[in-house]
Image (cartoon, helix red, strand yellow):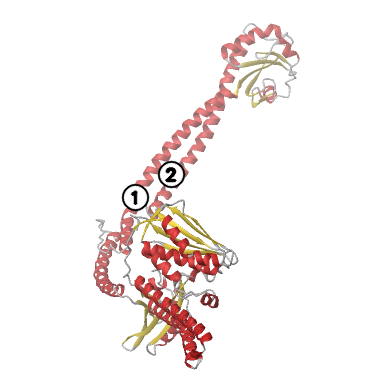
Amino acid sequence: MRTKIFWKFFFAYLFVIALFLLISYFFLRSYLKNEMAVETAHHLDQILIQTRDSLEAGGQPRVGIGSAEWDPLIDRLSRDLEVRISLIDLHGKVLADSGLSGSELTNLENHRDRPEFIQALDKGYGQSLRYSSTVKAPMMYVARPSSGGVIRTAMPLSGLSRSYQRLNRLLWAGLLLGAGIAMAFSFFLARYFSKPLKELSQAAFQMAEGNLNIKVSTGRNDEIGLLTRRFNLLSENLNQLIQKISDEKNQLQVILESMVEGVMVFDSYGKLLLTNEALREIFEISPSYEGHTPLDLIRNAGLHEVVREALNGRGSAEREIQILRGGALKYVMVHASPLKSQERFQGSVLVFHDITPLRRLENIRKEFVANASHELKTPLAAIKGYTETLLAGALHDEKNAMNFLKVVDQHADRLNQIIQDLLDLSKIESAQYELRLEKISLAGLVEELRLTFQKELESKKMTLDILPAAVAEVWADPSALRQILSNLVDNAVKYSGSGGKIALRVVPSGPSIQFCVEDQGPGISPEHLPRVFERFYRVDSSRSRGLGGTGLGLSIVKHLVQLHGGEAWAESELGRGSRFYFMIPQKGMI
């Protein structure tokens, strides 16, 4: 890679030499072109004189003699001398022409206005370069007076042009050869002067890249050699200083990167100095932060307040902030402390603790306690109310007492079902539920489902269409798969109106088996759909409790499917029913 100074030297020398060569080329081309024209004219003149001598050898030609007497002699001389020869009388009439026949001479126009004819009569010699309308080609003419007229010789310029083109090619070849020599000379001359400067430039570049062990040696005793020695001394001093700083920085960086808390340090002007990996993961920012303020990277009003308090240098500050990253809300505790050196404020350090998992657990606990309390409160309140009514005297009312006891029994069963579902869910989530995988015949499982829900289907005049023809057997835990399908079909029966239809489809999907339970119920709105698998979550609380659901069935379905290594999801449109899917891998894929 050549340096800029090299190319400056190179093009400067090359420009001077190239300019000299171009001037020489154009001068020689013009000079030789003129010389060729003069030489051609001289050649024609010599031929003309020779022709005139031949014609006058037997006596002077007389004007008015017919062309038939002169044409044979003119044609013979033209063939021998390879030029065109014309005889013209003093009035401009062409008497003979080696390029024309007798009939053509008759119709030939008068030549008294031709430049070479006029010059020959006035000065004794005429010369012209022009286009010939007779032969339809550019020609060179030379004319001299003779006894009783003018003798003219002519030659096509095509021959002269070919000679000129050959000469021009030779000149171009010489020019290109000279350009090559000029480039080589310029190259070596430019390298001689730029090489020491290039070595210094490369050394400085490597030093800027971090290589402080670089040394330069030019072997010169001039100013460039002195500059080289001082450069080497500077490199050695910088190497020692930067090595010390680098060791301290690396030690600090190791400490920061090993911390689980995010750390941000900025100077007294609020410009960022450094961050660690934990901070970049919390806020999902890039490492390029130099010269920015904290708010350039993290837009948050709470953080702005903490930074403002930290820049005041009055003391520590602490605040919990919330940020939105990747569509999820994060909770971060920020602690700011001032950086001081000899009681002089130099900046602040902010430590960030990601408390999102803690807040999420707290929210889950609060929601679970609230939902569980609410679910348990309803049957307990009913049992308490009817029991008090019985104790108050209704026990002796045989007609109402039996009805009250039936209601108490129903709510006790509901309490038992809620507790049983909670125990099952707890067992599944705590990894105490062990799957016993085996081949299951879908035909037997389908028939069992049909018998289980036969009474409910008949009471609501509903049909259960089961289409498992595409798959005969599946690999799963029988008890778990039975509970998954029972929960989904039970929900479909409860939420579908009378006369509706429920469909169960089982199809292969790559290395897995996909199940779908479809109903014709009221459907689920889009805002509720992502949360239907949460525990105790209800789209319509009053209707769900009226139907006797615990709010835990779909959550149990999701966890049992996940234990199989699969996934569960739902699709629905308001007024068009719902479709609940789950997919479980087959043997060897779990």
* Kind of residue at badge 1: Arg
Residue carrying label 1: 191
State the image quarter where residue 358 is shown: bottom left
Classify mark 1: residues with Cα within 10 Å, few (<14), some (14-19) or many (20+): many
Location of the C terminus (image quadrant): bottom left
Please state the horizontal and vertical placement of residue 473, each as a whole percent of the image: 39, 53
Numbered disc 1: secondary structure: helix
Please state the horizontal and vertical placement of residue 119, each as a whole percent of the image: 68, 25
The earlier-in-sequence mark between 1 and 2 is 2
Q: Which of 78 and 177 is in front in this view?
A: 177
Residue carrying label 2: 17
In the displayed structure, 179 sits above or below 201; it is above
Q: Which residue is drawn at 51% across and 67% down?
A: 456
Please state the horizontal and vertical placement of residue 390, each as a whole percent of the image: 48, 90
Q: Which of 542 and 177 is in front in this view?
A: 542
Left or right? Give the position of 54 relative to 335: right
Please state the horizontal and vertical placement of residue 371, each as a whole percent of the image: 46, 80
Choose mark 1 or mark 2, whichever is in front. Answer: 1
Distance Cα–Cα, label 1 vs label 2: 17 Å
Left or right? Give the position of 567 relative to 145: left
Q: Nearer the viewer, residue 381 or 476?
A: 381
Instruction: Answer yes or no: is residue 279 visible.
Output: no
In the displayed structure, 104 sits above or below 29; it is above
